[in-house]
Amino acid sequence: MSLASLLLLLCVSFFLMTATKLGVQAEGCSPERCGNMTIATPFGLVSGSEENTCMQLGFQVHCTDGVPYLGYHSGYGLQILNIFPKNSSMVVSDILKLGDFNNLSRQGCHVPMADAATKIEPPFSISPLNQNLIFYNCAKPPPTRAGLVETVCGNNTFVRAGGWYNTTGGMNSGYALEGCNATALPVLVPSGEANARDYEELISDGFLLTWQPLPSAGGSGIKVISKRILILIVSSAVSTLLFPCICVMMRHPKGKRLWSRSKRTSSGTERNYEVMILSYGSLAPKRYTYSEVMKITSSRNHELGKGGYGVVFKGRLHDDRLVAVKFLHDCKGNGDEFVNEVMSIGRTSHVNIVSLFGFCLEGSKRALIYEYMPNGSLDRYIYSENHKEILGWERLYAIAIGIARGLEYLHHSCNTRIVHFDIKPHNILLDRDFCPKIADFGLAKLCHAKESKLSMTGARGTIGFIAPEVHSRTFGVVSTKSDVYSYGMMLLEMVGGRKNVK
């Protein structure tokens, strides 16, 4: 049996098991509105002690003043922010935790003292896609304050970011502080690392719950369960036949490499992609299949350029819009830069920022679909020795102003501040009228804080354009000013017409 056949059987088995899960939810409550949110199966609205028999056990939602809360009443304090039934997940916010920081509360201002897990019961569980915020209540000032942010309560109370949430309970011993009681809270961060300074905003934005649907208990559940049993039998049979084939493949060196590469690809990329979709909801950029992307580019027929990241091809959408499709190399890490670029540029809408029409993520195959820029990148003109391609001073000035406006938008006018970290002529694209557009957000970082200071691990950018503080923290803090430095270095090259660093 070929590897292609094995992969096909794997897909069939996965489809059947997915159908099993969805089969349980085939029948349920009629959709109802609570404020701006639609509550549909497997969830159901409850009113006081009354409960609809159509809902599954544990999926009760209480509506108070147009706000949905998980549970029989709003006293649990778990406000539902979004529900993703296809992913069996939801985002909730523990609003009572925000009340802890209120000086007027009955207990006075204090940091959270109970883990969010104390409120979570089956069928729900806290997703490992969440990150940690760790709050400390110390009897005396801690011996070191590295990474700690003092809370509004003062009185030796602190908070810090603590990596990914530990679903097995407990907390990494590396975050323990002598003489301090610690409490870990999960938060869902769309991109990058949690910034402890934004602790109130992060708590308000909520955390991710997942669930395993339970069989229906109502009279109509017999038909659903019967379907489920039938699908289970078929999927079990397929799995039984498939298992020996997988064992044979795993013993083969080529099969081992394929399996290993598949695991590496999915571990980081799929986790980040899941967070991306959850953070965007229905506003996520359009996702294309690999076959659709190949059709858009006429099987990668017209190459525009290539670099360390991959190859760019010209294409055309079904509505006749011209696009540039960037195919990333299969070997580019775990997909962090790819997801980061989709999330960063997907949040923008500005005349001086390149538009993202969609993306493709299919196993190790990744592609980004941008608006087509007929005049290419700025470096083609400022370094050119061809007099016909040299831009006049007036046009160079207009390009410089346009780039500055794009940066001002990213740093101050966008919904979430974005620091690009790779401003250089190669990443400035020019449309038909030579209007500049900032592109390539693979190294960008989102900044949720009102301040523009950023925490980073490692340098990022291109030699000759990297701000000193990005290379070494001894020169100061990393902020939006790091982009301003890169912009200044680019201006020097635009004026001089040559590369400052070779």
Image (cartoon, helix red, strand yellow):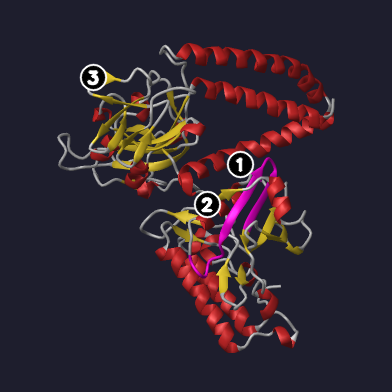
Q: Quadrant of the N terminus?
A: top right
In which quarter of the view is residue 178 placed?
top left
Magenta span of residues? 350-369
In which quarter of the view is residue 231 placed?
top right
Residue 75, relative to residue 51: is it above or below? below
Label 2 and label 1: CA atoms lie apart by 13 Å
Residue pictured at 65% horizontal, 77% vertical:
500
* Residue 300 visible, this orientation: yes
The circle drawn on residue 99 is none
Please name whichever residue, 206 or 197, is drawn nearer the observer in this view of the structure. 206
Please name the residue that numbered disc 1 is placed on: 269
Q: Type of residue at label 2?
A: Met
N-terminal label among 3 and 2: 3
359 falls in the magenta region: yes
Q: Position of residue 473 (x, y in %)?
A: 50, 59
Please name whichever residue, 415 or 63, is drawn nearer the observer in this view of the structure. 63
Q: Quadrant of the C terminus?
A: bottom right
Please name the residue that numbered disc 2 is placed on: 343
Q: Is residue 154 left or right of residue 116?
A: left
Task: Characterize the local packing of mark 3: few (<14), some (14-19) or many (20 or more) Cα atoms within 10 angstroms.
Answer: few
The circle drawn on residue 49 is 3
